[in-house]
Image (tube, rainbow, N blue to C red):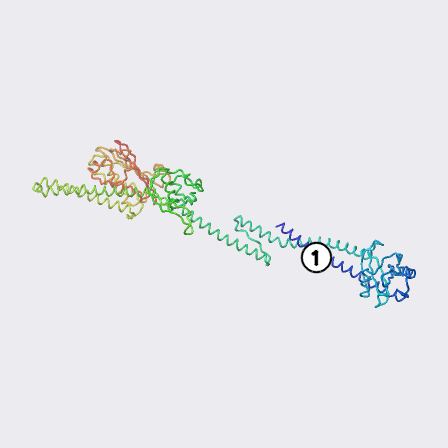
Amino acid sequence: MNSFRFRLTFAMVALIGLSVLAAGIVMGNTFKQNHINALEASMVREMRIILDGMDWQGSDAGTPFDYYSEQARHLKETTESRVTFIRGDGVVLGDSDHDARTMDNHAERTEIVEAGREGVGRAIRHSDTLDENLLYVAIEAVRGQPDKGYIRLALSLATVEASMSRIWSALVIGLLVLFVVAALVSYRLASGLTRPLEQITAVAKRIKSLDYQARVNVKNHDEIGELGQALNAMAESLQIQMARIHQNENQLESVLDNMINGIVMIDRAGRMVLINRRAEEVLGFHAGEMVGRHYTEAKQQYELTQIIQDGLEHRDHVREEITFYFPEERLLDLNLVPIFEDGSEFGGVLLVLQDVSAIRRLERMRSEFVANVSHELKTPVAAVKGFAETLLSGAVNDPEITKSFLQIIYDESERLNRLIGDILELSKIESRRVPLQFSPIELPSFISKTVEVMTSEAARKHIDLSMRVEPGLFVEADEDRLRQIVMNLLANGISYTPEGGKVSISVQPLVDGRPVSGGDEQDYDYIRISISDTGIGIPKKDLPRIFERFYRVDKARSRSSGGTGLGLSIVKHLVELHHGTISVESSVGIGSTFIIDMPVIQ
């Protein structure tokens, strides 16, 4: 902008200087011409006065060189000019400065020719005789009769040239002063014009650097002010648009990062341009490492690379299910969708990764559940049908056999009824159609009543059933469902503990995940219910699946004890509805301990 300021200043100074120079030249030439015209008029008057006061003989007097030479020398002293008398044919009759006899014929001289044509002639030329510029003015000696001769005065232009030199010197000095003044004024004017432009340029550079809050301080109301206002309006519009773009980008980034499906966008050249957080987890690499790089550089199994390659080559929708083993084993549903920009130009492919491991596991569990339910239902139904057929075949006539078979039919019906009840209960719990009525429960009295209910069953097997509860413990829970949890676990402990064994239940408060004694004056957020037995125990390999539906460690023992295989699954779901956790510790031949951690406040 400074260069523009100096260029503008120089242009203004040059324009002013050229204007002043041109005016000076015109004025100088005009002054010189006026001065010469004034000298010419004065010389003409002098020559007419001379002719009126002398006896002009002209060509009729022969060659009176001495007479005219004497007159010319005398007149020079009066007029201070060179005086020349010329005959009509151009012969010089007399001259104040030279011998007329030696001078050339003046018939072709410019002033003589012009005087013969117009009566008065003028010429300016360099005199070789005097070696200076002279103004020659000639008139007819007798008006209207050029053949009578001419009188000519010659005046040196030295005075005129001296005057012109003084004028030019003054003009140059004035021009220099004017240049200085014009430069200062022009610089101030240029600064006033360019300063707003500099501010506008600085704001434009800030906007270019993505600083959309930059504004021009507009004070003028001229074209530059309008330009500043337009730039401010543009910056404000850009700021609003960029805010919207950033908002949309943040929303899109938030959507992509929180999607349950992995998204990978690959351009037509095979470079990965977008990878969301879920895709990073599924594929095992970071977006910062792979964005901008070719998909073949990603360390993935061959099937995925081949699917992407086929999608880029054939530009068709591809769907496959592939088992991935890195970073962990997953079953992924892959959808490769071609992207067409502007409806026709191929822009690349979009890879959508969905982890269907849980879905397939649930489908498998559902199939297993249907198979298990069918098997569990088939056993009692088959028993009822078989014994009923036996009775119909004639065994009904034997009272003892009839009573025995009817008892078996009754037991199997009861078992079938329990099985159906447990299935319906589990279905309601899993679908969260079981409304829980939370209320404060005093655990010592609650556990005492529950243990009292199970005492008779434990007594039949001579099992020692004991309890240990810290006094003053409370928990917020659904009392009926909590009793169902505890009774189910106690019943399991009694069922799988041999005669003479022990089953115990204890309740402790938890602080920072550690059980504390009742004497500690600390606030607790969780309570722990532990149910232990000295039963047959659970093998280590079966522990991860112990809470699955219909899963039995010892199928023969479970069936003989009347279990349906759904008790622990129901317990697990009820504990989770109370926002708690359940775990098991067991050793074969030593016993098992089921541990429930439950929040005090729901």
Residue 41 image-quadrant placement = bottom right
What's the amino acid at mark 1? Ser
- Residue extending farthest top: 589
Location of the C terminus (image quadrant): top left
Q: Residue furthest left?
A: 397
Q: Name the outermost residue toward the bottom.
A: 144
- Residue 179: % across, % down: 71, 53
Q: Which residue occupies the foreground of this view, 441 or 264?
A: 264
Residue nearest the observer in this picture, 545 or 41: 41
Residue 299 lies left or right of residue 181; in this view the side is left
Q: Is residue 215 above or below residue 391?
A: below
Left or right of 370? Residue 249 is: right
Please state the horizontal and vertical placement of residue 146, each as a whole percent of the image: 84, 66
Residue beneath the point at 72% across and 57% down? 22
Which residue shows up at 57% across the image and 56% down it?
227
Vertical side of 320 occupied by 73: above or below? below
Disc 1, SS: helix
The answer to whether residue 487 of the structure is visible from this angle is no
Residue 125 seen in render? yes
Q: Where residue 401 appears, x then y in whole percent?
A: 10, 39
Q: How far across and how far down the image is residue 337, in percent?
A: 37, 47
Taking depth in this image into account, of 64 and 154 the one nearest to the observer is: 64
Q: Residues within 10 Å of mark 1 (few under 14, many from 20)?
A: few
Q: Name the residue carrying label 1.
A: 19
**Number of numbered discs overlaid on the protein picture:** 1
